[in-house]
Image (cartoon, rainbow, N blue to C red):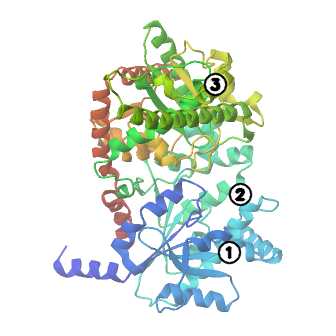
């Protein structure tokens, strides 16, 4: 390219506008929220005030995290004013997250029923996509799409024709404007990114040979079978009409080819703003600090029945949506059962506590679990009171010693505290086994995790080397059982286990990595596939990949059990070194390194 051509290309980008549209803009409902929010600083760095996000105004509490822009001369503000003049409810402001991106929020629920019906009718008449009788979400999606289209028309009207406008749409819930942008020949370049095909997620749950059968599914028949025809037709049309189709991994690119009938034009791997997790050289100290917090939970949950050496206890966890097969919960449980039997045969003195952190309908935290924790807290308070009393009296006694004979410490404890301490401990101890699930589930009988544990006899018995804690709610500081953040819980664990069967990307092992925690993933997850292709020494860096793509379930289960057994056998020094290697490699997934994949696609359009 000549210097003149190069300067011309650069000049074009300098004047281009980039608009990213997603249902998750300032709306925390899924993994795309993490994508949108975490890469915002790099988008601002590359595009400055020419970058804007568009999303739905659904949460009325959103005004706590966005700040309205009441005056301006930029095209985004002008477009917002044009819609306000039409009586459309629109909010233009700054999202108060790192990078402070501009956001346009449009309220689909502000449109009355006749307007909703009209939007649905136009979608049917123009694009042959029927949504009558559909759920509220689809109605909101259709109305949101029509509002976003009007905003793009206003933006084009407010922008000189020479300036390129790029519209980047994430997932079917945000992609509908692509259809009319193409049909009306509006001068907006479009990219559609599917993070997981709507049909692929359903098929993976219900088809044991999903990947083998992928080329042979009829997408229309399968969409009707699962009752997701409107969503699938919207997604299929967006993939067909966009200028560029992208996805997050080679794994999902195969779905695009066979289910959306279009080959992906580019791969946009997900990253993180690693600086958000960086604790300088403190991450090892943070691990020790939050491991102690998990110790407190484990003591309250298990030690009323029996105890084990916490210095020889490893904490493993898995988390995410409750998708028993897709998230690999089944494979994880199978491998844990094998690990338990192997450690018992070896007469190992290591205990593994495995946490399943997911979301399932429950009535309340189990009263027995709460009671045990409350009594343990009472024991702690007794110990603190005794400690203060003994310390004070011992200090006084040490100043009046005459024959250098050390006093008996027991004489410094009042009978009241002795009795209260003894009674509290006796009331706490029980012959019952520690519960597997911490909450009272609404439908425990049909819960697949519970059913598996019962079938294999994993009941948290004293002789079991693997203990199970099933926590059917997300961890947060207001939890009565874990009074700290999920991020802190992860830091306190030793290993994350995520051997997914279906996972277009998979943020959980990446988030572990960013926190210096080794993790297990699978070759069927986008993240696992990426590190296999780009990180040949991944195990050295604490990332273990279970082979699931071309292996039987039984083979993969044995492999995972072997990975877990090898990890358990590591010395404390070796685990510390592995955490160092893991944290050091996390920078590879910083958005500052991965944002180039986005920029390559934008350059194609400019």
Q: Residue 54: which quarter of the image? A: bottom right
Q: Answer with mark 3 or mark 2, whichever residue precedes in sequence.
A: 2
* Residue at 62% from the left image edge and 67% from the top image edge: 176
The disc label shown at residue 419, or none: 3
Tell me how far mark 2 sits from mark 1, CA to CA: 21 Å
Q: Residue 394: which quarter of the image? A: top left
Q: Answer with mark 2 or mark 1, whichever residue precedes in sequence.
A: 1
The residue tagged with tag 3: helix, strand or loop? helix
Callout count: 3
Label 1, residues with CA under 10 Å away: few <14, some 14-19, many ≥20: some
Q: Answer with mark 3 or mark 1, whichever residue precedes in sequence.
A: 1
State whether residue 580 is above or below residue 161.
above
x, y percent for residue 94: 50, 77
State whether residue 310 is above or below residue 502.
above
The residue tagged with tag 1: helix, strand or loop? loop
Left or right of 451: which side holds 318? left
Name the residue nearer the viewer: 494 or 203.
494
* Residue at 63% from the left image edge and 29% from the top image edge: 416
Name the residue nearer the viewer: 459 or 133.
459
The disc label shown at residue 107, or none: 1
* Residue at 60% from the left image edge and 80% from the top image edge: 91
For disc 2, the marked residue is 230
Mark 3 vs mark 2, foreground winner is 3
Viewport quadrant of the N terminus: bottom left
């Amino acid at each position: 390219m000549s210097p003149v051509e190069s300067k011309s290309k650069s000049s074009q980008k300098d004047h281009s506008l980039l608009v990213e549209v997603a249902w998750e803009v300032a709306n925390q409902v899924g993994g795309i929220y993490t994508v949108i929010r975490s890469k915002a600083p790099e988008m601002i760095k590359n595009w400055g005030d020419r970058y804007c996000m568009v999303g739905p105004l659904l949460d009325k509490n959103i005004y706590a995290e966005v700040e309205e822009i009441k005056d301006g001369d930029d095209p985004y503000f002008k477009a917002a004013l044009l819609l306000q003049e039409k009586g459309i409810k629109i909010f233009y402001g700054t999202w108060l997250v790192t990078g402070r991106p501009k956001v346009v929020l449009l309220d689909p629920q502000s449109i009355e029923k006749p307007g909703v019906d009209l939007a649905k009718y136009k979608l049917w008449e123009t694009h042959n996509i029927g949504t009558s009788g559909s759920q509220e979400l689809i109605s909101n999606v259709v109305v949101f799409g029509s509002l976003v289209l009007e905003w793009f028309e206003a933006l084009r009207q407010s922008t000189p024709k020479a300036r390129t406008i790029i519209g980047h749409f994430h997932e079917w819930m945000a992609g509908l404007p692509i259809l009319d942008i193409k049909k009306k020949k509006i001068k907006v370049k479009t990219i559609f990114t599917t993070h997981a095909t709507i049909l692929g997620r359903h098929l993976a749950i219900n088809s044991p040979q999903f990947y083998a059968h992928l080329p042979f599914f009829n997408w229309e028949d399968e969409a009707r079978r699962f009752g997701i025809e409107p969503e699938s037709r919207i997604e299929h049309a967006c993939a067909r009409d966009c200028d560029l189709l992208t996805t997050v991994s080679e794994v999902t690119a195969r779905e695009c080819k066979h289910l959306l009938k279009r080959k992906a034009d580019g791969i946009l791997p997900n990253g993180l703003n690693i600086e958000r997790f960086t604790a300088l050289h403190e991450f090892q100290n943070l691990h020790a600090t939050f491991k102690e917090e998990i110790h407190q939970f484990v003591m309250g949950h298990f030690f009323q029945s029996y105890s084990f050496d916490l210095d020889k206890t490893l904490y493993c966890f898995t988390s995410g949506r409750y998708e028993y097969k897709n998230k690999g919960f089944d494979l994880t449980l199978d491998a844990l059962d094998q690990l338990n039997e192997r450690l018992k045969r070896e007469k190992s003195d290591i205990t593994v506590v495995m946490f399943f952190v997911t979301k399932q309908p429950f009535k309340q935290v189990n009263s027995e679990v709460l009671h045990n924790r409350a009594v343990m807290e009472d024991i702690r308070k007794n110990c603190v009171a005794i400690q203060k009393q003994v310390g004070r009296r011992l200090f006084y006694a040490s100043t009046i010693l005459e024959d250098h004979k050390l006093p008996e410490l027991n004489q410094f404890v009042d009978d009241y505290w002795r009795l209260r301490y003894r009674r509290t401990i006796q009331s706490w101890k029980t012959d019952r086994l520690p519960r597997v699930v911490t909450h009272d589930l609404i439908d425990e009988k049909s819960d697949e995790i519970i059913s598996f544990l019962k079938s294999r006899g994993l009941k948290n018995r004293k002789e079991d080397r693997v203990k199970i804690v099933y926590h059917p709610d997300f961890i947060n500081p207001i939890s009565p059982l874990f009074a700290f953040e999920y991020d802190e819980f992860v830091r306190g664990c030793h290993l994350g286990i995520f051997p997914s069967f279906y996972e277009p990307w998979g943020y959980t092992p990446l988030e572990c990595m960013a926190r210096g925690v080794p993790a297990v993933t699978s070759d069927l997850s986008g993240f696992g596939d990426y590190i296999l292709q780009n990180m040949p020494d991944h195990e050295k860096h604490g990332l273990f990949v279970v082979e699931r793509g071309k292996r039987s379930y039984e083979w993969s289960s044995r492999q995972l059990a072997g990975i877990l057994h090898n990890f358990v056998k590591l010395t404390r020094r070796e685990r510390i070194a592995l955490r160092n290697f893991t944290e050091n490699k996390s920078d590879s997934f910083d958005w500052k390194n991965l944002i180039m994949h986005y920029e390559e696609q934008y350059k194609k359009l400019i």
